[in-house]
Image (cartoon, rainbow, N blue to C red):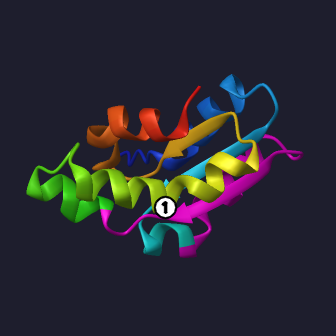
Amino acid sequence: MPVVGVIEPGAREAVRVSRKKRIGVIATEATIASGAYTRALRAAAAKVEVYTRACPLFVPLVEEGWLDNEVARRAADLYLKSLRQSGIDTLVLGCTHYPLLRELIDAVMGP
């Protein structure tokens, strides 16, 4: 049976769309600690700069349905501040829950 993952295709797409090759990755603590996205991004482009941030509260926020309230906004501000300041031009949402927070993440990260 073929097994298809999401990390390598996501990394290749991030490298393809990134203009400055400064890519951020947000994911769970376990995914960030594994280094899987960093390895996949560097395999796709040797000179890519990778900035990672674990966002462990995002999963329970999504599961609670708190996609855009004060708690979610504060968590997003706290988690994403360093990535916003790093000069990344592409952000990988490295958890299946995170796209549900896309509008909030877009608002916090800006253009």
Residue 32 x, y percent position in the rendering:
54, 68
- Left or right of 53 in this view: 88: right
Nearer to us in this view, 2 or 42: 42
Spot occupied by residue 98 in the image (x, y as percentages of width and height)? 34, 47
Q: Would residue 47 be counted in the magenta stretch?
A: yes
Amino acid type shown at disc 1: Tyr
Tell me the quarter of the picture where residue 64 sits.
Answer: bottom left
The answer to whether 41 is drawn above or below residue 71 in the figure is above
Q: Position of residue 73 (x, y in %)?
A: 33, 50
| Residue that protrudes farthest toward the front in the picture | 70
Name the residue furthest right: 47
Count the marks: how many?
1
The secondary element bearing badge 1 is classed as: helix
In the foreground, 64 or 29: 64
What residue span does the magenta drawing correspond to?
Answer: 33-57
Q: Is residue 27 above or below residue 73?
A: below
Q: Residue at x 11, y 50 (%)?
A: 65
Residue 81 horizontal side relative to residue 6, left or right: right
The residue to which callout 1 is attached is 79
Nearer-the-camera pick, 20 or 42: 20
Would you place residue 26 above or below residue 110 in this image? Answer: below
Q: Is residue 25 magenta?
A: no
Image quadrant where one finds the C terminus: top right
In the image, farthest residue toward the left: 64
* Residue drawn at (26%, 61%) of the image: 59
Residue at 81% in and 41% down: 45
Task: Tell me residue 54's x, y (percent).
Answer: 49, 67
In the image, what residue occupies the spot 69% across and 33% down? 89
Residue count near mark 1 (Cα–Cα under 10 Å), binned few <14, some 14–19, many ≥20 = some
